[in-house]
Each structure stands twice: as C-alpha cells, then as structure tokens.
Amino acid sequence: MTIAVFTFSLLGALALGMPIAFALIVCGVALMSTIGMFDSQIVAQNVINGADSFPLMAIPFFMLAGELMNKGGLAKRIVNVALVAVGHLRGGLGYVTILASCILASLSGSAAADAAALASLLVPMMVAAGHKKSYAAGLVAAGGIIAPVIPPSIGFVIFGVAAGVSISKLFLAGIVPGLMLGVGLCVSWWWVVRKENLTPPPRASFAEIFKAVVDGFWALMLPAIIVVGLRFGIFTPTEAAVVVAVYSLFVATCIYRELKFTELYEVFVSAAVTTSIVMFLVAAALVSSWLITVSEISTQVVDLLRPFMGNNTLLMFAIMVVVVIVGTALDMTPTILILTPILMPIIKTAGIDPVYFGVLFIINNAIGLITPPVGVVLNVVCGVSKISMEEIIKGVWPFMIAQLIVLFLMVLFPGLVTIPAKWFAG
C-alpha cells in the first residue's frame, strides 16, 4: 500500500506540472497521512536538516568552478590541447571531443556545463569538417555525461551524503570507469565514421603541440592537484571543491586574464542560482527519504527483489534496468535522492560494496541525462548547437548504446571498478 501511495503521489504531482522539489514534499506528506502521523513541523524540520550537511558545501564551489572555467578560458585551452594531440586522426575531431570531455570532466563535475562549452566550440568545427551535425551533437552530449563520473563529481557528493558512503572513495573509484566510458565512445565513433571519406587535418608539429601544452598548462594542472590531494588525504572532497574554485578564479583572472573582474558578479549569480535549485531539491528529498524509512518501503522493495538476492550479478542487472527506466523520466539529482534510500538497504543486505554500487548508480544516472524524453544534456546541446531534438536523438543512439554496454560490463566484471578503486585508495 505504501509503495503505491509513494509512486502515484510522486507521479501525480509531476504529471500536474509541479516542480520536482515540491513533488517530493507532496509525496512525503501523502506518506505521512497514509501511516497516520502527519505533522507540519516534521516536514519543516526535515527540509532544514536536508540542507544542513557539511559535505554538501562542495556543491556551490563546484558549480562556481564550472562557471569560472567556461568563462575564463580554461575549457578553450583544454580543447586546443586535445586538438593538437589527436586532431590528425581519421575522424580526429570526434576523438578531440572525447579527450576534451574526459579532461573537462576532471575540472568541473557538471555534465550540462561541459556539454555546453564543448558544443559551442566543437560542433561547428565538426560540421565544417564534413561530419553530420546529428552525430557531432550526439557525441558532444554523450561526452558531457562523463563529467559526473570522473572526480570532482557533484553526483558523487549527493549520493555520498544520501547513502552515507565516503565521498573520497567514490571520487577515486570513478576515475577508471569514467575513462572506460571515454574508450567506449572512441569505439562507437570509429564505427560511425568508418565509411566517411574525409581528409583529416595534418598532424600538428612539435612546436604547435608544445605551444598548446604550455598555454593549457595551468588548466591541465588542476586534475593532478585534485587526484593527488584526495589520494594522499591533503584535503577532503569539500575542501577540494574550494581549492578548485579558488584555483579557477586565480587562473581565469590573473594568468589567462579572460575573465574581467566586472564579470565576476554575473558568474557568482549564475552559480548561486544553479546551486539554490540543487540544494532545495536535496532539502526537499529528505522529507520523502525519512518517510521511506519510517513507512518501511525499503523493506517491501527488498521482499520484491528477494528472488535475485542469491546472485549479486542478477540483482545488479535488475537494479540497473530499473534505474535506466527511471532515468528516462527524471533528472539525475532527483533520481539519486529518490532511489538511494530505497536501494541502499538492498545493497547492504546483499553484501554488495556500496562504493562499487555508487559508481554504477551514478554512471546509470549520467546516461539518463541523454535519454529522451527528458534528457537534460540533450536539451542543452540542442539549444547551443541549434539542432532539433529529433536529429540529436538519432545522433546520440550509437554513443548511448556504447556507454550502456560499458555499464553492463562493469556489472558482469565488478573488478573493473573495485580493483582500480582499491589501488587509488591505497
């Protein structure tokens, strides 16, 4: 009964056009009324407690860092480095997009911000080189979703807080899976362009490579700073967010000097608006999360999945399929906040490593950002690239399928995630 109330109250509120944060509160109130314990003070208290978390302070700083990188010239220099490195290959601009996506992912953590930056720079270049616009935009969108997997990742921060899992371990465990997603995109891009008869640009000279690397040195240093700092315990993920934001601000204003001090107000306001949306979602989700625990919905879901409990691989397959389906209708943040309190008791009961599950869960949610009809990253790339949703959906399919294959390979072979994670964690 409580599962039905939870599902239909949430879907009903969303069907009426209610913002997701308010729909989560309505869902919580419906559950409270069902079990006979409605109290408005409990609702208010849970909303306040939802945002009262030190690790969540990382979110505004990562948001600010993403804005500073895009406006301050760091993203542009990353693309230039990728261009001189692999631009001469057959279909080279596609590999440039993938390499730049992986590097940008280690700077920002926001899929939408990375996709917007790459779409504005690379889609026109790929179209001018003779590639189909649908495939160019689709590749940029698929590359953008690597951002929530390679640290720093806002998705890992939210999941870590909601699930009570070490964010540092999640960050370090996401490095290799994120790079594997990039390899999957390389294979799918090779398959897409194998029949194209395009002349690639000439290989960059050593002088051009050296110049691009020197010019992008300060941007390329940031991933190393983050990984080394987390690996050796120099700073926590929350402190890493501050380091990223301050470093980006310094490089953008004092070294590259592409961001004027008069533009800082606009950057700070944009980051604050985005942060407020995410934080209110997190706060509102605690109402329904608390009620999920109190009404024992998790226990009921465990009973439903009990036939899979004897085989962790089948259980993970079942969970991943559910998350894929949910991801077609909901954005990443609400999906994490809604499903985490339901799924974590199942994961603990089955004895699955929560860090391993967290990585696969975030990858799955990231893929949801390019699945129609919602597909937030698809909408961002459509707007920036001036392409219709129908065209980009046709173009993104090969790359989305490749990333799903990588995801399910990790389900079949957990060592692809757990072994590198243990090595990075020391």
Image (cartoon, rainbow, N blue to C red):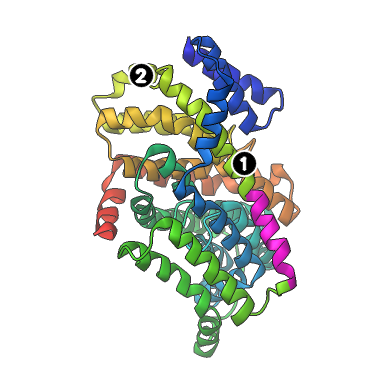
Question: Which residue corresponds to the image point at 59% horizontal and 81% vertical from the top-left?
Answer: 255
Question: For this view, does 186 lie left or right of residue 304?
Answer: right
x and y, in percent, of residue 163 in the image: 39, 38
**Which residue is at the front of the view, 209 or 203?**
209
x and y, in percent, of residue 72 in the image: 64, 71
x and y, in percent, of residue 256 in the image: 62, 80
Against 288, is 241 above or below? below
Choose mark 1 or mark 2, whichever is in front. 2
Residue 9 included in the magenta stretch of the image:
no
Residue 268 included in the magenta stretch of the image:
yes
Q: Which residue is mark 1?
A: 375
Q: In this orientation, does residue 198 appear?
A: yes
**Which amino acid type corresponds to the residue marked 1 in the rendered image?**
Gly
Q: Earlier in the sequence, mark 1 or mark 2?
A: 2
Where residue 266 sits, quadrant-wise, is bottom right
Q: Which mark is residue 343?
A: none
Against 244, is 204 above or below? below
Question: Which residue corresponds to the image point at 26% horizontal and 29% vertical from the top-left?
Answer: 350
Q: Which residue is mark 2?
A: 299
**Which stretch did the figure color magenta?**
262-274
Question: Which residue corresponds to the image point at 58% horizontal and 34% vertical from the top-left?
Answer: 330
Residue at the far front in the pictured view: 41
Label 1: few (<14), some or many (≥20) within 10 Å? many
Q: CA distance from mark 1 to mark 2?
A: 31 Å
Please identify the dominant SS of the magenta region: helix
Q: In this orientation, does residue 131 appear?
A: no
Where residue 187 sits, quadrant-wise, is bottom left
